[in-house]
Structures are given as structure tokens and as C-alpha cells.
Amino acid sequence: MLTLASTAIITLLSIGLAYSITLKYLERRQTPLLFWALGLWAFAASAALEIVFAADIYSQYFMAAYLFLVVLVVQLLSIGSINLIKSKPMKIAYYAFSILIAMYALFTIITSSISNLVTNFVVTGIPPMPVIISSSIATVVASLVLIGVAAKSYADRHNRKMLYIIAGVVVVAISGLLYIVAFPVLLYYAEFIGIILLWLGFS
């Protein structure tokens, strides 16, 4: 019940934040806001699947979708951040990398035999090695992009709210990495902290 309640809270918070950022995008039409909103909707979808797992409902298709969403979240958030820089070639290169790594991750998920990764209503199992490799590449590179762009953005603007936003984005990204590298116990804590930081940044 505790797991179900915590995942429900995380889902509701992420939906609320995704909706808020979507409204900001519709108002300002800024590309970073678009991808941050898409990333948060993907995060909300993955959190919703955690509710399904916590309710003792399991499907291999649900797990495959969950594993892909973990990759999609960090890619979309990092694409949002890369749009804060002015270098067009760097943006194009990262767009290309993101598409390729997402396709590679999807391929490894589809072609791998994924067993039941849920234990005691929590996602704790280790995915197949090809999935770990593709997901880790995507998550590590995205996290480095997020941290690098964050540092530059703060140095240029000295906006304290930017620190909350960047910290939240990085924690949400790392939450996926924690699961991938076999620290699932910390997954839900990291998700909750990341969402709270993002709320503080965008409020």
C-alpha cells in the first residue's frame, strides 16, 4: 500500500508539473519548454506504470514500455536543455545522437527476452544486458549534457530558480540510471526529490 501511495503521489505531481510546463510552452513558444514538457509527460507515464506494477498488475509489454520511457525521459529533458545553447551544429549533432540512441534502445528492448522485473510490487529486477548497455549510454550522455548546459546557463544568468530546475532535471535523469545500474530501492526517492525540485524551479 505504501508503494502504491508513493507512486500515486509521484504520478500526480508529475502530471501537474507537466501540465504547468505545457501551459508555459503554449504561452511562450520556447523550444526548451516544449521538450521539458514532453519529458515530464513521459516521466508521468512511467510513474503511472509504476502504479500499475504496485497494484500487482504485470505485463511484459508494460515493462517494455517502462524501460523505453526511462530512456525517453532523459533524452527529451536533455534535448530541452541543449536548446539553451546557441551552437546550431551542436544542437543538430545531439538531435541525431538522441534519435539513434533511442532507436538502439528500442531495438534492444524489443529483441531482448524480458522476465518479470517486479518484486514485492516494486521494479527491482535487472534488465537484459543489451538493454542495460543501450540505456546506460543514453542516460550517462544525457546527464552529462544536462549538467554541462546547467553550469553554463547558471554562469550566464545567475538565476537561482535555474539551479532548482537543473537539479530537478538531473535528479530525474539519474533516477533512471539508479534503476538501470541496480539501485532500484533509491528509484522512487530520486523521482520524488526530482519532481519537488522542478516544482520549486518552475513556481
Image: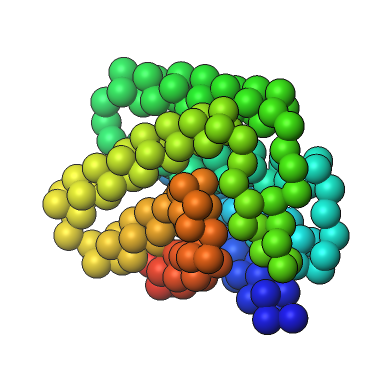
Residue in the image at 42% along x and 53% along y? 174
The quadrant of the picture occupied by the N terminus is bottom right
Residue farthest along the left direction in this orientation: 155
Depth check: 64 or 126 in front? 126
Residue 108 against residue 196 in the figure, above or below: above
Q: Quadrant of residue 108?
A: top right
Residue 90 screen position, x and y as percent:
31, 23
Depth check: 199 or 195 in front? 195
| Left or right: 49 as drawn, with respect to 130 | right
Query: Is residue 84 in view?
Result: no
Residue 164 against residue 115 in the figure, above or below: below
Residue 116 against residue 164 in the figure, above or below: above
Residue 162 screen position, x and y as percent:
30, 60
Residue in the image at 51% along x and 46% along y? 180
Depth check: 34 or 145 in front? 145
Residue 5 screen position, x and y as percent:
70, 79
Residue 73 screen position, x and y as percent:
54, 45
Residue in the image at 82% along x and 65% along y? 56
Query: Is residue 108 in view?
Result: yes
Depth check: 109 or 93 in front? 109
Please say which color scheme the image uses: rainbow
Residue in the image at 46% along x and 54% along y? 178
- Count numbered badges in the picture: 0
The quadrant of the picture occupied by the C terminus is bottom left
